[in-house]
Amino acid sequence: MSPEPFVVIVVLSWNGREDTRACLCSLETLVYARRIVLVIDNGSDDGSPAMVRAEFPHVHLIANPANRGYAAGNNQGLRWALDHGADLVWLLNNDVLVEPDSLTELVRALQTDPTVGIVGPVIHRIHQPGWADVGGRFDFWTGYARVLLWEPAYEGLETLEVDYVWGCSLLVRAEVLHAVGLLDPRWVAYFEDADLSQRARARGWRTVTALRAHVQHHIARSGNKVYLWQTWMRLRNYVLFYAQYARPIQWPGLFLAFALVHIPLYLYRSAGKYVAYKLLSKYKGREMSLWYRGQ
């Protein structure tokens, strides 16, 4: 990479005009200079493409006639970035707000250690002040996917090694994409980031969180628009991910864990959230607690 790698920022948008506007405004505050922004609009009918053209004429825009899904939409951006000579590609959900030095710190993590292939920031939950995600880890014996939360012990550290970083804000080397491929469209949405991280780690690349990089995120803002579909897709991909990457010796335990614990608990939480989402306005925008939170 050059002293200042060329970064293409891919923002995926679907019927979130105000979120997209806020995201693009925050991107204009970045102090990192060698960057361009590409918006992939997935068939929005709320005027999002027109807003981008009118208010952000310097932003590149691909407006799809229909919703192609999360993985396929982001892959359009990844291919565009690689075709235009990107050294790094930053996948960013349109409901993310970035801090001015966030990209600088993400790039620093990659430049400091050439074995790091994928890096994410500390993700602060806008609807849950005081909560911040720093990636996660998988347990292929028990089926738990652990969301790691910020804790004081991380003060002073530059990076944290993790199994995956959130796809809502994921910076990846172009050479990683050339080596392992793009997002797998079979996932459609959910676990495509975990799958990419797993494939990269299998090739020897490390996945880390840059603890000095910070963004804010409206978690589940897009998914809640299609909640029942989201519920099914997250559960399906949760099971398929473990089935794909667990070793045969781990399958019996995983089968019991999913049948007796994970699937019943997931359905119980999903039904509870659906009722709360419909009846109580304070729960709108809350994420569904699929994964275990903790260390």
Image: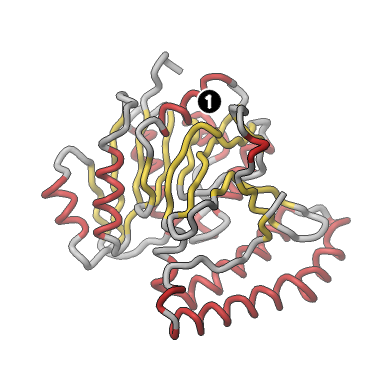
Position of 64 with respect to 249 (left or right) is left
Residue furthest out toward the top: 3
Position of 192 with respect to 46 (left or right) is right
Rendering colour mode: secondary structure
Determine the residue positioned at 26% across, 64% down: 44
The amino acid at mark 1 is Leu
Q: Residues within 10 Å of mark 1 (few under 14, many from 20)?
A: many
Determine the residue positioned at 88% across, 56% down: 249
Determine the residue positioned at 54% across, 73% down: 231
Q: Position of residue 49 (x, y in %)?
A: 20, 56
Residue that badge 1 annotates: 110
Residue furthest out toward the left: 54
Position of 73 with respect to 150 (left or right) is left
Q: Nearer the viewer, residue 133 or 37?
A: 133
- Count the marks: how many? 1
Instruction: Work out whether 203 lies above or below 254.
Output: above
Q: Nearer the viewer, residue 58 or 151?
A: 151
Q: Element under label 1?
A: helix
Q: Position of residue 83 (x, y in %)?
A: 35, 33
Instruction: Work out whether 202 lies above or below 87.
Output: below
When asked about the image quadrant of residue 280, the answer is bottom left
Q: Nearer the viewer, residue 78 or 161?
A: 161
Determine the residue positioned at 69% across, 38% down: 202
Q: Nearer the viewer, residue 217 or 229?
A: 217
Q: Position of residue 143 (x, y in %)?
A: 76, 60
Position of 46 with respect to 3 (left or right) is left
Q: Position of residue 15 (x, y in %)?
A: 29, 64
